[in-house]
Image (tube, rainbow, N blue to C red):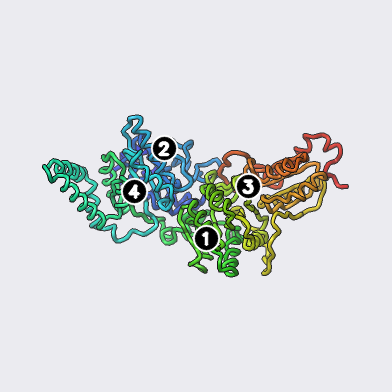
Amino acid sequence: MILETIQSPHDVAALSLEQLELLAGEIRQEIIRVCAHNGGHLAASLGAVDIAVAAHYVFPSESTRMVWDTGHQAYAHKLMTGRRESFSTIRTRDGLSGFLKRSESPYDHFGAGHACTALSAALGFSASARLQGRDRMNIALLGDGAATGGLVYEAINNTQAHGSKLLVILNDNEMSISPNVGAITRVLTRLTSTRSFLNLEGGTWRALGRIPKIGRLLRTLASRAKQGLKHLIFPGNFFEDFGFKYYGPLDGHDLSLLVRTMRQLREIQHPVILHVLTNKGKGYDLAEENPAKYHGFAPFDPETGSSLGASPSAPSYTEVFGEALLQMGHEDSTVTCISAAMPAGTGTDRFAEAFPERFFDVGIAEPHAVTFAAGLAADGLRPVVAIYSTFLQRAFDMIYHDVALQGLPVIFALDRAGIVGEDGPTHHGVLDLSYLRMIPGMVIMAPSDELELHRMMKTAQHYRKSPLAIRYPRDRGLGIDIPEQLSPLEIGKSRTLREGSKIHLWAIGSMVRPALEAASCLESRGFDPLVVDARFAEPLDRTRLLEEASKADLLVTVEENSSRGGFGEGVLACFREADMDAPSHLLLSLPHGFSPQGTRKEILAEAGLDASGIASSIEKALEKNPRFMETGVGGKS
């Protein structure tokens, strides 16, 4: 196998074009094999294989700065940069990251997990090279919808001011190879990207300027003629207006064409856009036919495409949210829904099918999604913004300034709150309780099961005083039946799930069930904990919390959020604000830092947030204070 001989881009550059084709095929088979076992972002990486092979073939130098957008297109890049032998560990605990990670390889020049960052980072590398007098190629590889994000256009707007030698490869994988990828486009691309054409273009421009009296006029006419031709043939006039040379679109799976074009473009000393059209899922028929399904996928049978996991006994929280949203849509014609390029991932696709005129997919543009929702709400509609917790971080200022400051009743549905699993630290939603708690007037709820999620959606539907957020995990419910008639919750009111004394466990969201299980463990050891489902991180059930404080010898909070600024710190703030001394307390949460990749079960257990970990932490807290053990704190009376 050729792939077995590849340890660096220099090995790729030593191959013939015929061997490159074989290498691309071997890479695709390896990606399919590993993703079938581990899960992963299959379709996007298969579609980008040829681009990665051509780029490393033409630009093998260590001085090249190659910046990938989002990172899940870069599996081929990993296989060609010394990580082939460890590739089977991708997305596993202590294995390779599913994205780009600077600490993982010297060829990962910039970390990438979220979309739209590549061009800004590559522009930084380009400006740095110019300031340090380095002649190197800086490459940004955009794709997988990244061009829908506003950050890309902010970078484009600054390219003329800061960019020099910069190649932007626009991997357009949102369509099949269209008719404009044909003979005419190929010929025009070859012509306009050759060194002779570029020299001719520059020479002609200089010659026209030397003609006495009419030189300036001829240059103007020539420029207009060129732009007119570009408007007829290329969609690149937009980029050229911002200082780029535009080439394409090319067939992104024609390796020889990609190689030839990149070789010619590396001679250009100013920003260049190379537009290529690719098929998501290229090389695996099932992924080509349904690229959305195979964008991010659990382990599967590569022959049939069917999942290898056991049939779920309960719906996911995403599915439960989608069902509740659909019901809201039927009951209230003012309900609208906004997705940031994730209708299937957020469970909003059913609403989109039922109410297409009330559904808005704004692309990878979370800040716009929030302010757009604010406009809808300001005009009397009920927008539901469904975005992954980690992605909503991008829109913090819009939540504060455009929604909360104006008291607009926008509903935020935060999917993937907490540990998301194998996608790792770029995708864990471990900060939302912290950053949303800072916003005045924000109501924050977290369900402990699917019935609670339905009731919280009903609560959101009827609450119109301020923005409201519901956060829920990447997990499944408990299989609870949902009654037809549901009543809203009282804002800021908790519920007791287990009566007890002395040890008070206040848990929220996904941590309620483990807290109950931990209480059962402690009961078998002679303790009698009280377990409260807080339901609300804001506003907290302050009255009950303060009234019962005198009865608690140990107050324990449990949350699937960072230790900084989350639910537990909010509980302690209640005592400070009431000028009361808090009882002895134990705040259980995810550690402050970047949680690693791994399964939810693995990471939560390591953080001490499973039932045994919670029980163990409580016992250790009691052991540290002999007074508790001597008086039998928490013991049954």
Judging by the rendered image, the residue that carries numbered circle 1 is 376
Q: Is residue 406 left or right of residue 173?
A: right
Mark 1: few, some, or many residues within 10 Å (few <14, many ≥20)?
some
Identify the mark at residue 437; answer none if there is no mark. 3
Which one is closest to the eye, mark 1 or mark 2? 1
Mark 2: few, some, or many residues within 10 Å (few <14, many ≥20)?
many
Mark 4: few, some, or many residues within 10 Å (few <14, many ≥20)?
some
* Residue 14, percent from left and from top: 31, 39
At label 1, the amino acid type is: Leu
Q: Is residue 581 left or right of residue 603?
A: right
Q: Is residue 68 left or right of residue 610?
A: left
At label 3, the amino acid type is: Arg
At label 4, the amino acid type is: Leu
Label located before the other in sequence (4 or 3): 4
Task: For the residues labelled 3 and 1, say whether their Cβ atoms are less than 8 Å apart.
Answer: no
**Residue shown at 62% from the left, 51% from the top:** 442
